[in-house]
Image (spheres, rainbow, N blue to C red):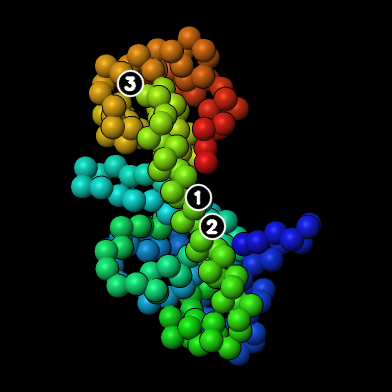
Amino acid sequence: MAKLGVITISLIDMMPDEVKKKLHRKTYNENETILFAENENNYVYFLIEGKAEAYVPNLQGSSATIHLYEPGSFFGELEQFYVGRKPVEISAMTPCVAYALHREDFFDWMKKDFEVTKFIIKEIAYKLIINSEYIEEVSLLTVKERLMRCVATHYRRGDIDKLTKEQITKETKAPMRSINRAIAECDRQGILSYKNQELIILDTTKLQIYLR
């Protein structure tokens, strides 16, 4: 989704009626997977309602969120341009409504409209740049900062009550003793605490600074 002045333009706003007729309406429940990692995907998705997130799951059961999608966003386009490993999974953070367009119809639309092609290339480039910056940024974070980002991400997802210290160590790639020190520091600063095997958020404003 691009913003020009105060006007927000989404890709679906640029779609001609003959293409819209080929869309398939999809609905997803909260936490339902929209696109599975490593699975072949022949569709581009246009999010109409709700929020979704793109993340990279690993064999240990943890994940790293790399992108947040809101109404007007589209996803699944990058997979149409290459054959190979597809590590990204996309899940509904809230109940979602999306329209799916088959890759052949997507490419046919691009061939007929150069402005749309430029729009899509610009969005792909933006995602690649943002994700590269994110990876570099994470590599420079302290354990406390990684902890805060991990907790903030789960708080946004709405599953903070299921987040354990063991899961935090997997997602932050930090040893338990370092996580304990970081939690103690956050407790002294009135941000969050950990009592009775449960994370307690003390200051949501400070916590959400760490959301991407």
Tag 3: amino acid? Ile
Tag 2: amino acid? Tyr
For mark 2, give the secondary structure. helix
**x, y (%) of residue 59?**
21, 47
- Crowding at mark 3 (Cα within 10 Å: few <14, some 14-19, many 20+): many
* Real-space CA distance between mark 3 and mark 1, rounded to the nearest whole angstrom: 27 Å
In the depicted structure, whether residue 154 falls above or below residue 107: above
Mark drawn on residue 126: 2
Of residues 39 and 196, the one drawn nearer to the viewer in this rendering:
39
Which residue is identified by label 1? 130
Q: Indicate which disc, 2 or 3, sits on the residue closer to the N terminus.
A: 2
Nearer to us of marks 2 and 3 is 2
Residue drawn where x is 29% and y is 27% of the image? 174
Tag 1: amino acid? Ile
**x, y (%) of residue 93?**
47, 51
Residues at marks 1 and 2 touching, judged by CB atoms closer than 8 Å: yes
